[in-house]
Amino acid sequence: MKIYYPSVFGDINIEQDNKNVVLSTVDLTVSEEEVLKEIIKKFVGKIKEPIKTYENTKVIIENVKIEDIHKFMIKKLKKNKLTLTAIKLKDGKLELVDEIKKEHVEKADSAVTTQKPTRGCPLPSITVQKEVRASTVLKEFLTQQQIEDFNKHRSFVSIGNYTHHPYLITSRWSLTIEKFGQVYDLVEKRKVCTSCKEIPPSEEMLAMKLSVELNELDFLNTPMSE
């Protein structure tokens, strides 16, 4: 059985492997990394290998039950937030459960825990509000083709004003960000490492577009930050 804990920014997945539990991580948030450290501290002496990094790695905890790890992790991650936990049975049906138990591990293929939605009409988070405004501004400066590509793929192509290379500019909220990065040279088939994380994703895309289309040489020659 494999248990998923997804979030907006990262993931911790848990899987039972005989008597061991394997935790795999992807792009952890600070809070998720702290919880992972707490799990290791609680089950000290059961770690097969020392942890060099908590980022995109696997942690093996020996002689422990997956339901115990899950219960501890959810308590730490969710704290006072209400959650929903569902299991996917071997016949494909979904079933809500209060918590993962031994019988669930035996009859289900996978499980997931997510935050329970609240009723009402709360305003979007500040980040989402800013992104809505930023995407509106972005479209004011896109060609019609770029707008269509942005609406469909959250990416578009800009032509460099110096090399005339086409660059694929991708939102950091896009599913293809890991493959292409935020700026991808389609001629040289390489990522151009760059970012503006302090501004909304669409404003960041606008900054990339302006840099590529109007200031490419200076953009490419800007020293890399450490």
Image (spheres, grey):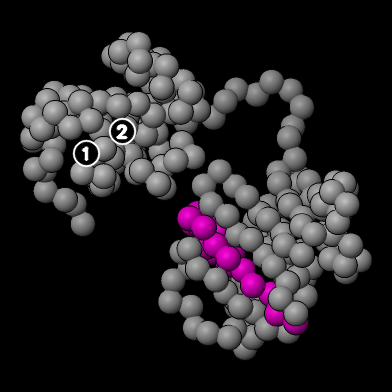
- Which image quarter holds the N terminus? bottom right
Q: Residues within 10 Å of mark 2 (few under 14, many from 20)?
A: many
Residue 169 location in percent, x, y?
Answer: 32, 32
Q: Is 33 contained in the magenta span?
A: yes
Residue 82 location in percent, x, y?
Answer: 76, 45
Q: Secondary structure at mark 2?
A: strand
Q: Nearer the viewer, residue 198 or 220?
A: 220
Q: Which residue is mark 1?
A: 187
Please name the amino acid that badge 2 sits on.
Answer: Leu
Q: Nearer the viewer, residue 61 or 177?
A: 177
State the residue at coordinates (40%, 46%). 179
Q: Which residue is mark 2?
A: 168
Provide the residue span drawn in magenta: 19-36
Please name the amino acid that badge 1 sits on.
Answer: Val
State the residue at coordinates (8%, 35%). 218
Residue 92 location in percent, x, y?
Answer: 84, 48
Specify whether 222 is left or right of 112: left
Q: Nearer the viewer, residue 214 or 123?
A: 214
Q: Nearer the viewer, residue 47 or 42?
A: 47
Q: Which circle's residue, 2 or 1, is located before the other in the chain?
A: 2
- Which image quarter holds the C terminus? bottom left
